[in-house]
Image (tube, rainbow, N blue to C red):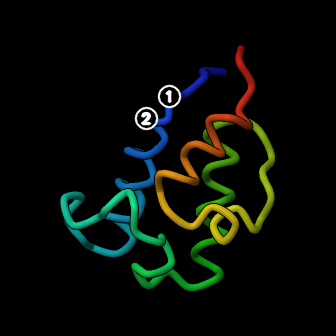
C-alpha cells in the first residue's frame, strides 16, 4: 500500500467532489468546508468509505465533520495512513 502525500490526498478529494457535484476542479477550494459544497450526510459517509478503500485504513465516520476543510481532512488522512 502506498503512503500518499497530503497533496495527492487533497487532489483526490477535489476530483471526487468535482465529479460528484458536477463542478470544475478550479471551483473547489482547499480551505472551504467540504459540506458547504452541498454534500448530504450519506454522500459524506460514502466519501469516507472511498477514502478508507484508498488508504487501506479505517477512519472515523465523522472525519468529514471533524476535519471540515479539504486541507484539514487530507492532513488527517495522511497522518492516519500507514507507511508501507
Q: In the image, residue 62 lies at what x, y percent?
A: 75, 68
Query: Looking at the image, do the residues carrying marks 1 and 2 touch, with CB atoms under 8 Å apart?
Result: yes
* Residue placed furthest toward the top: 84
Q: Is residue 17 above or below residue 52?
A: below
**Badge number at residue 84:** none
| Quarter occupied by residue 76 | top right
**Residue at 33%, 64% in the rendered image:** 19
Which residue does the numbered mark 1 point to in the structure image?
A: 5
**Residue at 44%, 81% in the rendered image:** 36
Which residue does the numbered mark 2 point to in the structure image?
A: 8
Q: Of helix, strand and loop, which one carries label 1?
A: loop
Q: Is residue 3 above or below residue 35?
A: above
Q: In the image, residue 37 lies at what x, y percent?
A: 40, 79
* Spatial separation of the CA atoms under disc 1 and disc 2: 5 Å
Q: Tell which of 18 and 71 is nearer to you.
A: 71
Q: Is residue 54 above or below residue 63?
A: above
Q: In the image, residue 77 lies at what x, y percent?
A: 64, 43
Q: Tell which of 70 and 17 is nearer to you.
A: 70
| Quarter occupied by residue 56 | top right
- Quadrant including the N terminus: top right
Q: Of helix, strand and loop, which one carries label 2?
A: helix
Q: Give neighbour class at mark 1: few <14, some 14-19, many 20+ (Cα, 10 Å).
A: some
**Residue at 62%, 49% in the rendered image:** 51
| Left or right: 26 in relation to 34 | left
- Quadrant including the C terminus: top right
Q: Give neighbour class at mark 2: few <14, some 14-19, many 20+ (Cα, 10 Å).
A: few
Q: In the image, residue 30 lies at what x, y percent?
A: 37, 57
Amino acid at each position: 500500500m502506498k503512503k500518499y502525500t497530503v497533496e495527492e490526498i487533497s487532489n483526490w478529494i477535489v476530483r471526487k467532489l468535482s465529479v460528484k457535484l458536477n463542478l470544475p476542479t478550479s471551483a473547489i477550494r482547499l480551505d472551504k468546508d467540504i459540506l458547504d459544497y452541498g454534500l448530504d450526510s450519506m454522500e459524506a459517509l460514502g466519501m469516507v468509505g472511498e477514502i478508507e478503500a484508498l488508504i487501506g485504513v479505517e477512519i472515523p465516520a465523522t472525519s468529514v465533520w471533524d476535519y471540515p476543510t479539504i486541507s484539514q481532512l487530507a492532513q488527517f488522512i495522511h497522518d492516519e495512513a500507514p507507511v508501507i
